[in-house]
Amino acid sequence: MTVETQQPAGARSYEFYSAQYSRFGSLLAAEIRREVYGEDLGQQGWRTLDEQQEMIGLINDRPHRRLLDVACGSGGPAIAIAAATDCLLTGVDIEEAAIEQAKTLAAVGQLRVGPTLIVADSSKELPFKDEVFDVISCIDAINHLADRRAVFADWFRLLGPGGLLILTDACVLTGAVSREELDIRASQGAFHIVPAGFNEVLLEGTGFELRVCKDTTDAVAGLAMRLYRARDSRRDALLEEEDAEWFESRQTFLAKTAELARTARLSRFFYVAVKPKT
């Protein structure tokens, strides 16, 4: 069972993604990413550089390396993976501003073959033929997609035999969380949480063979607090780019995300699953 949260009347929420992408290319945003992640790939979620390298290794093992990155955002990490693996990259995201950023990054990404980047609603059947990809990745976005069963089934359709799915879910319920805490954690938009073990059962029920299920919650706690502190130390400069309410909402979100992860009440898991060859 999934649990969907909706903002009650008067709850403090803010439009995150459109505002974030409008400031994505600023020197200040790049400076913060370098401090928080150690390298600026255009990332904004809970993926560490070690996890990025792990994904590169997994994709390098695929014979044809046709990668679909679902909810690719700015595309930075996926474009870096394409540069490292020489894979054929397709990225989809519902935010038009995100796809425009991805196209900008791809233009300077020194890729042998340019990626296909399109605006598409990842919660619905994607506009591709059956079995056209060797790898599908979806990093820290599954909580935004309501019908997880249908999404997994569509990914299964799109993968060729032996194809690989790399998935992370940063919203797995592993402890007691209050409604107030969930409202803060869900303040960026659509938000669906699942209990521990739900993704594993659903993936296997869809037909996937689960190969890896790894708890990466510590990374969320560390990255959220580093991002909070990096932003706080640049408060005056950020207030010239963000209005005060947006800034405070973002800081509240980061602090609560770090707390929920540190106390292992809302956890993140890294999954690797395979579509059987027969």
Image (spheres, rainbow, N blue to C red):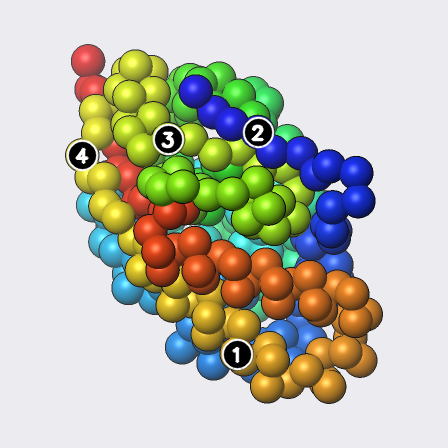
Whichever of labels 3 and 2 marks the residue nearer the N terminus, that label is 2
Q: Name the residue under label 1.
A: 229
Whichever of labels 1 and 3 marks the residue nearer the N terminus, that label is 3
**Mark 1 to mark 2 CA distance (whole Å):** 30 Å
Disc 4 marks a residue whose amino acid type is Arg
Quarter of the view holding residue 126: top right
Front-most of residues 210 and 117: 210
Q: Mark 2 points at which residue?
A: 4
Q: Name the residue under label 4.
A: 211
Disc 3 marks a residue whose amino acid type is Pro
Disc 2 marks a residue whose amino acid type is Glu
Residue 138, image x, y percentages:
44, 41
Front-most of residues 169 and 86: 169
The quarter of the picture where the C terminus appears is top left
Which residue is depicted at the point 54% across and 54% down? 75
Mark 1, Cα crowd under 10 Å, few <14 / some 14-19 / many 20+, is: some
Q: Mark 3 points at which residue?
A: 195
Front-most of residues 53 and 67: 53
**Mark 3 to mark 2 CA distance (whole Å):** 12 Å
Whichever of labels 3 and 4 marks the residue nearer the N terminus, that label is 3
SS label for mark 3: strand
Question: Contact, CB < 8 Å: mark 4 with mark 2?
Answer: no
SS label for mark 4: strand
Residue 7, image x, y percentages:
70, 38
Which residue is depicted at the point 80% across and 80% down? 240
SS label for mark 1: helix
Whichever of labels 1 and 2 marks the residue nearer the N terminus, that label is 2
Q: Would you place residue 152 above or below residue 205 in this image?
A: below
**Mark 4 to mark 1 CA distance (whole Å):** 36 Å
Front-most of residues 175 and 209: 175
